Image (cartoon, rainbow, N blue to C red):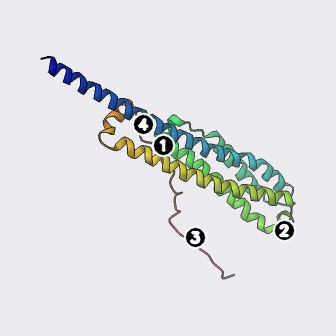
Amino acid sequence: MKGKLIIGLVVVGLLVFFGISINNGLVEKEEAVEGAWAQVENQYQRRADLIPNLVNTVKGAANFEQETLTSVIEARSKATSVNINASDLSDPAKFQQFQQAQGELSGALSRLLVSVERYPELKANSNFRDLQSQLEGTENRISTERKRFNDTAQNYNSSIRKFPTSIFASIGGFERKAYFEADQGAENAPTVDFGN
């Protein structure tokens, strides 16, 4: 009788130790996802901080398209108003809303930079060139941080789905994290026409 009790206690002790170990590993991976997310937000904030200076520099160009500037300002306002915190990373709808707002801002900035081509005096402005270079660097950083976030989220998501960790993950309330996805239509190559 005592032998069975001791064996039972040892088995329960091992299960508790195993469960604690799994839980701690999942907490560490979830924290890594949240850290990667903070870096993504940091780069988006850097971009948002550059935009007012870029817009003010462009406003100085005579006859620059006001509609283009307005769309950039509105897209920036919307992108900075859609906030997502680490607990929302498990909500695909909120994550998609954030990604859509950032995508709209990227599109508005692209249209702004394309329309600048018609203004040689603006392209020659050193402030504009510096801001454009900083913005391009920031876009590259955003892309890098988004990839790091996706890699970290994939590692976490894989962990919570594997058996037996999945049992402890469901008990501990660990939920799947969303991924950044390509913008809608990104699978289609752009049309290039040199006919003119």
Give the distance between the C-alpha atoms of the residues marked 4 and 2, in whole angstroms.
Answer: 55 Å
Tag 3, which secondary structure?
A: loop
Query: Which residue is under mark 3?
Result: 190
Specify whether 178 is left or right of 76: left
Which residue is located at x 18 percent, y 19 percent? 5
Q: Residues within 10 Å of mark 1 (few under 14, many from 20)?
A: few
Q: Quadrant of residue 65?
A: bottom right
Q: Quadrant of residue 45?
A: top right
Give the distance between the C-alpha atoms of the residues marked 1 and 3, in whole angstroms.
Answer: 28 Å
Query: Which residue is under mark 4?
Result: 26
In depth, the one of 156 and 44 nearer the eye is 156
Residue 188 in percent (x, y) is at 52, 67
Q: Which mark is residue 93?
A: 1
Residue 60 in percent (x, y) is at 87, 55
Sequence-earlier tag: 4 or 2:
4
Q: Quadrant of residue 97?
A: top right
Specify whether 27 is left or right of 103: left
